[in-house]
Every structure is written in structure tokens, then in C-alpha cells.
Image (tube, rainbow, N blue to C red):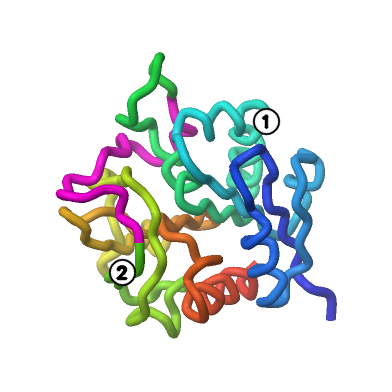
Amino acid sequence: MSRNNVVVLDYGSGNVRSAVRALERVGASVELTADPAAALACDGLFVPGVGNFHACMAGLRGADGPRIIDVRLSGGRPVLGVCVGMQVLFDGSSEPSAAPVEGIGEWPGLVQRLPAPVVPHMGWNTVSAPAGSLLFDGVADQSFYFVHSYAALTWDLPVADGHLAAATPLVTWCDYGAPFVAAVENGPLFATQFHPEKSGDAGLHLLENWVRAL
């Protein structure tokens, strides 16, 4: 049986070899590339993100990332954004910049600095995943590895509660100084603020859940 093909979008966002290795370990056929044709054609697109929001957005624009993500989502093709690769899916960030830089805008709201005595939030933390989560099936009680100073502190779209449409986003929360969005499952669009590829067996299980669903 052929393996699901995943492209890790290579737009200059730090060392992403750990993501490639993790995805390969859970059974995906993985390509690290900035080629738009490959990114559009693959079964699943993994969008990494390390460091500064504005630098990541500049790199994504240089690689035609916003259009690629929009085209994939319009066709119901899965996308997984990780860390700053999740943050760029919002309207923007309050992270300091010489000039305002807009995010991709798939979700409303600004990413903000964590209101904690010590930032970055670096290390392992548990999350609160909603019932019915695909990503956290089997690992909802596990810890995941975070490295970030900014996050979405609010969620401005309706969330699934059993009475809303199945397409309504499932939002997972974590707490560091204040509650923040740790993961989102929104139709074909998935995202985690933590690094599943650096989260040991729990992170591999989460990635395997995503790869199997492609």
C-alpha cells in the first residue's frame, strides 16, 4: 500500500529536519521542498515556523505560501501549521516589527505576547483537548513541548460543543500565565502551537493521527 505523501514547506524557517524525520517515522513519504507544484499536489502540507512572526511571513510570501495554503484549503486538502506556522494563520501579531505585517488571515485575531513572568514558555506542558479531537486521539492526557513567547490568547470563532455544525473548529487550550490556544482542528486546517516533532512519543502519535487521516 502506498504511503501518504507529505511536503514540509521549505521557506527558510530554521532547521526542519526533525519534522521530516518525525513524519517519516510515522509512515509518511516526506519531501522537504519549496516547489509550489509539489506543495499543492501532496496529500498533506506541513508548515513549520521558528522564530519571528514577521520573518516567517516574509519567507512564506517569498515561497508563495499564502496562496498555496489558500488553494489547498479551498479544495479541502489538509494543512498542518506548527508553532509560528500556526501563528501566521491568524490576522497578525503584536510582536514588534519595523512595519506592521499581516498574517494569512485564515482565523481572526492577533497573536499576543504571553502574560507570564518568564518568557519564552519553554518546556513540557499538558493541554486541554476537546472531545472528538482527531489530533489528540489517544494522547489527550500527555505533555507536549513548547518554545514560544507569543500565542493566540482568545478564539474569535464559534467552537464545537455538541450543538453546532460538525465543521465548527475544535480548539485545544493550554495555560502559561493565561490560557492560550494550543491547537486547532478546523476542517482540513490543523495547527499546533507546540512542536509535535519534538514531543517524544506523544508528538509522534499526534503526527501519526494526522498522517493516517490524509
Q: Mark 2 points at which residue?
A: 125
Mark 1 is on which residue type? Asp
- Could you say whether the residue bearing mark 2 is in a helix, strand or loop? strand
Q: Are marks 2 and 1 in contact (CB under 8 Å)?
A: no
Confirm whether the magenta stretch covers residue 112.
yes
Distance from Cα at disc 2 to Cα at disc 1: 33 Å
Q: Position of residue 162 (x, y in %)?
A: 28, 70
Report which quarter residue 114 is drawn in.
top left
Q: Name the residue under label 1.
A: 64
Q: Where is residue 194 in the image (x, y as percent from the top left)?
A: 42, 59
Residue 154 can be seen in this image: no
Residue 26 can be seen in this image: yes
The residue depicted at 68 percent of the width and 46 percent of the height is 9
Q: What stretch is highlighted in magenta?
A: 102-122
The residue depicted at 17 percent of the width and 49 percent of the height is 116
Which mark lies nearer to you, 2 or 1? 2
Q: Where is residue 193 in the image (x, y as percent from the top left)?
A: 40, 55
Q: Where is residue 154 in the image (x, y as percent from the top left)?
A: 23, 46
